[in-house]
């Protein structure tokens, strides 16, 4: 844990990061991350409770500027948010029944959402369920996994895109109460 006098200082690993800007290279700052994260959103078609949890993941990403390990925590939270959203969407189109009740987990919900046509065919890697659940498991079940900003941001981007696609799908939007 940081000492109190250093709480508002960037994590020392941030000092090595640069970006190309007008006039050349410059150090990356928290403003750069804030700008990227502000642009990354789930739309209003996604239920408010899921959007709120996605915002927690975005805030964890932002505070990763101060605590580098928060990038990994943000990625994990985003994947938990995806599972939550997929569970909600699957239940919406499944008449309130949880299709993964016997074997809940991100992988099951990704497979069910794909089978139900909630995830656009061909848009994502055909092993998406395996890839995302493997990342989630390597983080959630203990270990030494440490993601950097770029890897965690890629996770948040995929999660946002998936949630937007799923809740924009005709199957979900036609079954949702008004």
Image: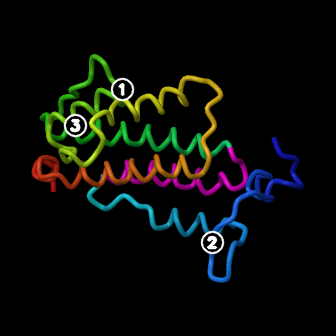
Mark 1 Cα shell of 10 Å, populated few (<14), some (14-19), many (≥20): some
The verdict on residue 142 being magenta is no
The residue singled out by tag 2 in the image is 20
Residue carrying label 1: 105
**Residue displayed at 24% across by 49% down:** 123
- What colour scheme does the image use? rainbow
Q: Is residue 124 left or right of residue 57?
A: left
Q: Residue furthest bottom?
A: 23
- How far from the left and from the top, in percent, is residue 79? 44, 39
Looking at the rendered image, the quarter that the C terminus falls into is bottom left
Q: Is residue 40 above or below residue 175?
A: below
- Which secondary structure dominates the residues rendered in magenta? helix
**Disc 3 residue crowd, few under 14, some 14–19, many 20+, Cα 10 Å:** many
**Relative side of 2 to 120, left or right:** right
Q: Which residues are magenta?
A: 47-68
The part of the image, by quadrant, that contains residue 115 is top left
CB under 8 Å between callouts 1 and 3?
Answer: no
Q: Residue at x 45, y 48 (%)?
A: 53
Q: Give the alpha-carbon distance from disc 1 to disc 3, as whole Å.
A: 12 Å
Question: On the picture, is 28 further left or further right than 55?
Answer: right
Q: Secondary structure at mark 3?
A: helix
Counting from the top left corner in percent of width and height, residue 83 is at: 36, 36
Whether residue 66 appears in magenta in the rendering, the answer is: yes
What residue is rendered at 71% in x and 72% in y? Answer: 26
Residue bearing mark 3: 113
Q: Quadrant of the N terminus?
A: top right
| Residue at 52% across, 54% down | 58
């Amino acid at each position: 844990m940081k000492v109190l006098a250093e709480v508002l200082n960037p994590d020392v690993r941030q000092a090595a990061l640069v970006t190309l800007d007008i006039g050349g290279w410059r150090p990356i700052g928290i403003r750069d991350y804030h700008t990227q994260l502000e642009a990354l959103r789930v739309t209003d078609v996604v239920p408010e409770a899921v959007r709120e949890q996605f915002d927690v993941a975005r805030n964890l990403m932002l505070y990763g500027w101060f605590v580098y390990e928060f990038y990994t925590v943000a990625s994990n939270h985003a994947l938990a948010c995806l599972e939550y959203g997929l569970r909600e969407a699957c239940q919406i189109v499944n008449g309130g029944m949880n299709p993964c009740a016997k074997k809940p987990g991100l992988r099951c919900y990704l497979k069910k959402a794909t089978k139900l046509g909630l995830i656009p065919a061909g848009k994502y890697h055909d092993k998406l369920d395996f890839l995302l659940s493997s990342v989630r498991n390597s983080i959630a079940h203990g270990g030494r996994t440490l993601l950097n900003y770029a890897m965690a941001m890629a996770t948040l981007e995929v999660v946002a895109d998936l949630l937007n696609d799923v809740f924009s799908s005709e199957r979900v939007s036609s079954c949702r109460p008004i």
